[in-house]
Amino acid sequence: MNTALSVFNEALPDFLQNAQSSELTKALAGNINKRLSIRGNVFRMVVGGEEVRKADGRTLNVVIVNAAPKVSRTFYKNAYVQGETAPPDCWSAQGDFPDPDVEDKQGAACATCPQNIKGSSRDGKSRACSFQRRLAVMIVGDPTGDVYQLMLPSRSIFGEDDGDNLSFHQYVKLLIANGRSIENMITELSFDTDSATPKLFFKPIAHVNREQYDMAVKAGKSEAAVRAITFTVAKTDGVKKEPQAALAAPEEEPKAEAPKAETPKEEVPPPKKRESKKVDPEAKKDLADIMKQWD
């Protein structure tokens, strides 16, 4: 019995063997955000906010094609509740000063902020304001070459190493010491099984081949890669700022009514949307230069 999906199990004609999704098909799909989640110490592929696949093992090979030039920071007053999304109370895209859009700034600068003091978190062990770094990665073996956003938590960036398994910061230093570029390497991601919360290790596996290199160069300059590494509180992180009714004007124009004798009411203009910041792709630094700055 044929189903709507059975066509994908059929052998492709010879002239379509090397064909992938066309630019037309991708354009029709729109700007669908793709993320590589590490929730529950499992690699999960999330497309448009829905989990579509998860890896079977504890390791995953990727090519890192782009990265945010600096570590970002976020602070939440309230404790995290499973299944709920809320915007941070204070944040910094560059990790130095609160962004201009922040209404409840916790300090004038991140370095001197009281939420940056070790022990200011609820458990009294870490900082209340957390670090993140956004990466754009391709999954090795995925013929589409799609770009996924991978957001690293603090302990994956600066955590302790375990032999050849390195934190991201130490991994970058290792590549620089050996004259290698991160986008030219196949990187193994693995979970620290001794960590109570998701923590990643990084390890170089091999150099990319010619086909992977060409795909990585193209992917690193793509709009999807730029979106993946751009810090946006609402769009990239899937956070709801306010109810929709408070953000947008009504979609339908009000119907005209016959004039009445009563005193006309003052017309209230529809609320305005807050404009989100966009990153100019031309302002992006080369990954090799960024790696040197990390060192």
Image: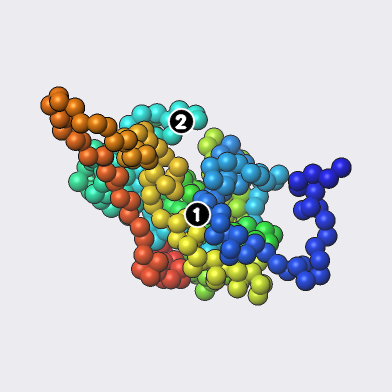
For this orientation, the residue located farthest to the top is: 262
Q: For the residue marked with disc 1, what is the amino acid?
A: Asn
Which label belongs to residue 31? Answer: 1
Name the colour scheme.
rainbow
Q: Distance between the residues labelled 1 and 2?
A: 24 Å
Query: Which residue is at a point 15% across and 30% down the rendered structure image?
Result: 264
**For the point 36% across and 68% down, which residue is it?**
283
The C terminus sits in image quarter: bottom left
Badge 2 is on which residue? 84
Q: Is residue 111 left or right of residue 73?
A: left
Q: Would residue 63 be found to the left or right of residue 100 on screen?
A: right
The amino acid type of the residue labelled 2 equals Glu
Identify the residue at horizontal 78%, vertical 71% (top origin): 15
Q: Is mark 2 on a helix, strand or loop?
A: loop
Q: Position of residue 279 (x, y in %)?
A: 36, 60
Closest to the observer: 155 or 41? 41
Assign a secondary structure to mark 1: loop
- First in sequence: mark 1 vs mark 2: 1
Q: Residue at x 43, y 71 (%)?
A: 286
In which quadrant will I find the N terminus?
Answer: top right
Q: In the rendered image of this protein, does residue 68 appear above or below residue 264?
A: below
Mark 1 neighbour class, 10 Å CA radius: few under 14, some 14 to 19, many 20 or more: few
